[in-house]
Image: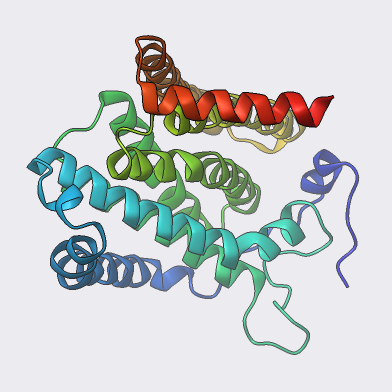
Amino acid sequence: MVQGHLDIGAHVQHFPISSISSLAPYSALILSVVLIVIFLIRFYLLQDLILPKFYGSKYTTLNDINRRGFLNHHIAGATKLLILVVAAYPFGSTAFGGANFHTPYVAGSKVKMGDLLLVCAQMLSGMYIFELLYRVKISPISVLHHMGSILVAQAAIAISIRGDRESSIEFVLCTVWGAFDIICELLPHISIILYRVYPDSHFFLANLFKYACITTFIGTISETILTMYLFAKLWDRWPLAFKVVTPLLHVAFSAAQFHGTRIFYAMWRKQQRILKNGNSKDLERAEVVNKREEIGSS
């Protein structure tokens, strides 16, 4: 059983210098397979079969920009959920526990912790590449975030193959970034999907966007504190290039996440204004909920 560490900083300071995975030389092949699978799911399943059948006119009547965005949120949300399920144990064991990248996933298994983390990193990179190529409209901040995420992940894998001494701690830092990105961005994907499905449920959407706004904001602050703490703890192990580039990349990542927070705050306030302007159906529902809350608190 993997023993936990109370101080993640002390843990990463003594994290062994090693390759990430024996699959690292095949990372380009793994990324290619991920992109092919995403294309097949998009083209043969979601685009003309599952989404039109499940959502009906709410999907088919969307314009091309919104339809592509709607489909992309399904791809991104499903991919992040799958990564969360697959990588939760390997990430927790290596970042916070006593495991390293070459610890077996289960006792006696040929599959190592690093194998699963590398595959998940390529899944996340593939998802970002798909979004950059598929979506018609995407903000410059999101473009910068996606490009930075892709390059950082691929650079960490590449220097691992070369055997650089900072490769293992760089990948640990990447997994921390990725974990926050997946956890904090999962609700926003769901929120946009539900926004397209229930555009007139203003009371529901106001609460949904409020929680999405709060989670992205808290997640970004928490991510900044933890990653910069780890970065400072490992200061003596970073070469000069990493000391300069890593903070700049984190600023780009944080800017993209705060941009998402700002968008959800605006959407939350918009739904509140609609309610105040007299959407009777949702106002009645809001009054019922408020009465229930008053009864429950009394």
Height in image: 235 above or below 237?
A: above
Q: Is residue 284 visible?
A: yes
Residue at the image position 60 percent from the left and 30 percent from the top? 289
In this view of the protein, which residue sits in the foreground, 62 or 15?
A: 62
Q: Position of residue 211 (x, y in %)?
A: 56, 30
Q: Residue at x 79, y 52 (%)?
A: 96
Left or right of residue 103, residue 250 in this image: left
- Left or right, residue 195 beside residue 170: left
- Residue 249 visible in the picture: no
Of residues 131 and 213, the one nearer the viewer is: 213
| Residue 34 in the image, given as x and y percentages of width and height | 33, 68
> What colour scheme was applied to this rendering of the protein?
rainbow
Residue depicted at x 26% and y 63%: 54
Left or right: 287 with respect to 195? right
Query: Nearest the camera: 165 or 24?
Result: 24
Residue at coordinates 78% horizontally, 85% vertically from top-left? Answer: 107
The answer to whether residue 296 is left or right of residue 169 is: right
Q: Position of residue 125 (x, y in %)?
A: 38, 53
* Image spot of residue 213 (x, y percent): 51, 25
**Quadrant where the image shows the C terminus:** top right
User: What is the number of callouts on the image?
Assistant: 0
Task: Assign the N terminus to one quadrant of the image.
Answer: bottom right
Residue sitting nearer the eye, 203 or 158: 203
